[in-house]
Amino acid sequence: MIKFNPLFISVILIFCIYSCNNNDEIIKSDIEIPSDSLSLGSGVFKYTYNAKGINKGLNIYYFIPQNKTAITPILFVFHGTQRNAKDYRNAMLDKAEQYGFIIIAPEFSEQNFPGGDAYNLGNVFVDGDNPSIITLNPDEQWAFSVIEPLFSYIKEKTNNTNSTYNIFGHSAGGQFAHRFIMFKPKAKVEKIVVSASGWYTFPDSKIKFPYGFKESPLETMSLENIFSKKVYLQVGENDDNPNAAGLRHNEFADAQGLNRKERAINFFQYCEELSQESNILFNWNFNTINNTDHNYILASESAANLLFN
């Protein structure tokens, strides 16, 4: 029988604790906890809300930095089409500690928000590609309508006194983010990073939704409300693959460009020119991430620098 020296075992245990804690110092095990007990570090809780008589729940992956105060900024992070909110939160952890901000990453599951209609397009219509008055969902059922109440909820649970929050959305999350500020112009958003969207809703009332404003509640939208927001439109320098997985191609999407980079540039330029023609303040900026393709981790780091550095 092999006997181990107690001193040897102690050394091994200390080594394991140190090694395992190197990253888990920030990432604790994501066991679902009551939302009343949000603590420093990482975690996840279930947020339940009522959408016109229908109860829905979202897993909220969060992170609270060690130096949290009552005025620590809050950042909402919107995941891509894989619905991997946890991964998106984790990609921001080092930056959140460095700059001192709270991460709130809602998981819009396929079960509760199926397909692009319910997530990318905010569940505004039953069928977002074929909008009509008959298929327009009540505002309470829009995915966009979750964010403001969730912000108030997070403020309460973290004793936060901020009146505004920030947004970062990448890929499908970038689609959600730019449409969110269109459909919710009075939202308490301070800064937004719209990153590498596959395609966009242009502020053009001659083009039918979802590629433009026509036949949607956006027809009466004030452009001033949209262009006055502090928006960073972001895309990777090498995010120019026209055959990228999941990239939509049809006559309307391809009119915006043949890849994410072209579409981002064309969308920004269109909005900038429209603001000039309308004599409206344009508070947007364009950011290219050098030597990067469609990488959500590098996009997350870039977004944190834009928002908080």
Image (spheres, helix red, strand yellow):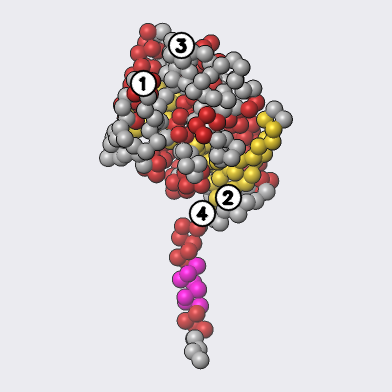
Looking at the rendering, the stretch of residues picked out in magenta corresponds to: 10-17
Q: Position of residue 41 (x, y in %)?
A: 55, 51
Give the quarter of the image for residue 132. Answer: top right
Q: Label 1 belongs to which residue?
A: 251
* Image disc number at residue 43: 2
Among the two numbered marks 2 and 1 on one chain, the one whose residue lies closer to the N terminus: 2
Q: Label 3 belongs to which residue?
A: 205
Q: Which amino acid does the dot numbered 4 rest on? A: Ile
Q: Position of residue 274 (x, y in %)?
A: 38, 12
Report the mark closest to the observer, 3 or 4: 3
The answer to if 15 sits in the magenta stretch is: yes
Tag 2's secondary structure?
Answer: strand
User: Residue 10, relative to residue 54: is it above or below?
Assistant: below
Is residue 181 visible in the rendered structure shown here?
no
Among the two numbered marks 4 and 2 on one chain, the one whose residue lies closer to the N terminus: 4
Mark-to-mark CA distance, 2 and 1? 43 Å
Tag 1's secondary structure?
Answer: helix
The answer to if 293 sits in the magenta stretch is: no
Q: Is residue 296 left or right of residue 237?
A: right
Q: Decide: marks 2, 3 in contact (CB < 8 A)?
A: no
Q: Mark 1 Cα within 10 Å, few/some/many (few <14, many 20+)? A: few
* Image disc number at residue 27: 4
Among the two numbered marks 2 and 3 on one chain, the one whose residue lies closer to the N terminus: 2
Name the one closer to the observer, 235 or 287: 235
Among the two numbered marks 3 and 4 on one chain, the one whose residue lies closer to the N terminus: 4
Mark-to-mark CA distance, 1 and 3? 17 Å
Q: Mark 4 Cα within 10 Å, few/some/many (few <14, many 20+)? A: some
Among the two numbered marks 1 and 3 on one chain, the one whose residue lies closer to the N terminus: 3
Tag 3's secondary structure?
Answer: loop
